[in-house]
Amino acid sequence: MPMYNFKCACGLRLERLTTETSIICPNCSGVAQRDSVNLISPVVAGGTPAEDIDKTVGRDADKRWGKYNDRFLDKKKAREDSGQHAMSAMPTPDGKVHYTPISKEDITQRKELTKVLEGSKVLSDL
């Protein structure tokens, strides 16, 4: 199916993969008439139109950002409940993350361990 160019009376130009001779303009809700055929159609390997790929990528991005925002809110709540900023993250079997506060002693131990490891061959080999 070829990609057609449409032009509306409001001046908006559109491209659509359709056999229709006119479409509804998303700008003014008027009727956009088919103007010409676009001989270079944005179709990727396998014959999937770019418009379908954009929708799929958009849904996937929304899903991923939703998970990110959920984790952010969980971490924020754990910080507010504990009164501490430093958190340890532990994955749960249901795919979520459980946050627990890190004590000041643990933070100090981690810093000391980091200093030791920075001077060792363990980190220099990475």
Image (spheres, helix red, strand yellow):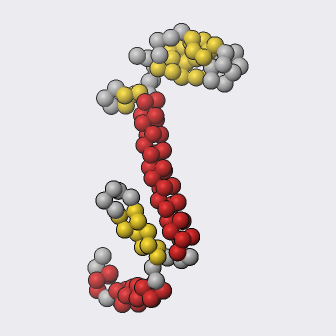
Q: Is residue 27 above or below residue 35?
A: below
Instruction: Give the camera-side residue of 113 and 36.
Output: 113
The residue drawn where x is 34% and y is 26% is 47
Q: Position of residue 31 (x, y in %)?
A: 64, 13
Q: Nearer the viewer, residue 85 or 124?
A: 85
Residue 124 in the figure: left or right of residue 115: left
The image shows residue 115, relative to residue 26, as above or below, that is below
| Residue 72 in sight here | yes
Residue ID at (69%, 21%) = 28
Q: In the figure, 8 relative to 91: above or below?
A: above
- Farthest residue to the top: give it: 21
Q: Is residue 8 left or right of residue 45?
A: right
Q: Identify which residue, 79 or 108, lies in the foreground.
A: 79
How many marks the image carries: the answer is 0
For residue 88, which quarter of the picture? Answer: bottom left
Where, quadrant-wise, is the C terminus in this rendering? bottom left
Q: Nearer the viewer, residue 24 or 37?
A: 24
Q: Residue at x 62, y 15 (%)?
A: 32
- Residue 119: x %, y % from top left: 36, 89
Give the percent coordinates (x, y) of residue 124. Answer: 32, 82
At x 50% / y 68%, what residue is drawn?
78
Q: Quadrant of the N terminus?
A: top left
Q: Residue furthest right?
A: 10
Could one spot residue 35 in this view of the protein? Answer: no
Q: Is residue 94 left or right of residue 68?
A: left
